[in-house]
Amino acid sequence: MADEHGKVDRADIAADLERARIEFQRLLAAAGPEDWCSPTSGTRWTNEQLLLHMVFGYMVVQRLLILVRIFSRLPDPVSRAFANILDAATRPFHLINYYGSCAAATVYNRRRMGARLDRVIGSLQRRLARENDADFARGMHYPTNWDPFFEDFMTLEDLYRYPGRHFAFHAHQLTLTATQ
């Protein structure tokens, strides 16, 4: 959250990114051989697939940072129309989101996903440190039907905070025996 002077607490965002990185490494270490293929609670994914999906939440922010820079400079109706078009494609998006995580978990599997998250979070932390203070207030509209943590309009600050919320939500759905 921005302070009374409108300055974003970068240290808080960076700490949240680091907390997720550490927690993810802990989850990977806690997973026993039988856990990887076990079903999760409330999803159709296995633990391995859901863990990869959690990494993907950070990867997608890297791409959304580009989009918010573009759309925040355009008239508001352009961003709103883009979000509406994406919302109209919610059904195919959910299929791609599900099967994409299933397929990606075969590449970024249990042996590779930790290193991938480390690199992505490192990249996000470097970008965060370089952001212009004024840009944190820039934003765009998002497809609210795609993810429960997408708001109709999100600022750059909101976008940096999004993957932590996504991560925490899905971490509760894991069924790793050592964490229960």
Image: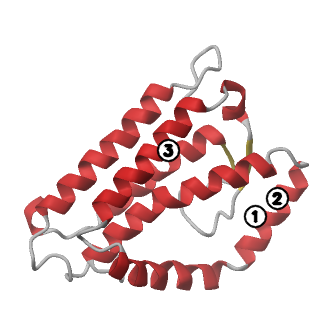
Q: Secondary structure at mark 2?
A: helix
Dot 2: few (<14), some (14–19), or many (≥20) neighbours within 10 Å? some
Q: Is residue 35 left or right of residue 69?
A: left
Q: Secondary structure at mark 1?
A: helix
- Residue 73: horizontal and vertical position, in percent? 85, 44
Res. 86 image quadrant: bottom right
Q: CA distance from mark 3 to mark 2?
A: 26 Å
Q: Secondary structure at mark 3?
A: helix
- With respect to residue 39, does 174 lie above or below? above
Which label's residue is closer to the chain start, 3 or 2? 2
- Residue 164: horizontal and vertical position, in percent? 42, 48
Residue 83: mark in rendering:
1
Q: CA distance from mark 1 to mark 3?
A: 23 Å
Res. 83 image quadrant: bottom right
Amino acid type at image mark 2:
Arg
Amino acid type at image mark 3:
Leu
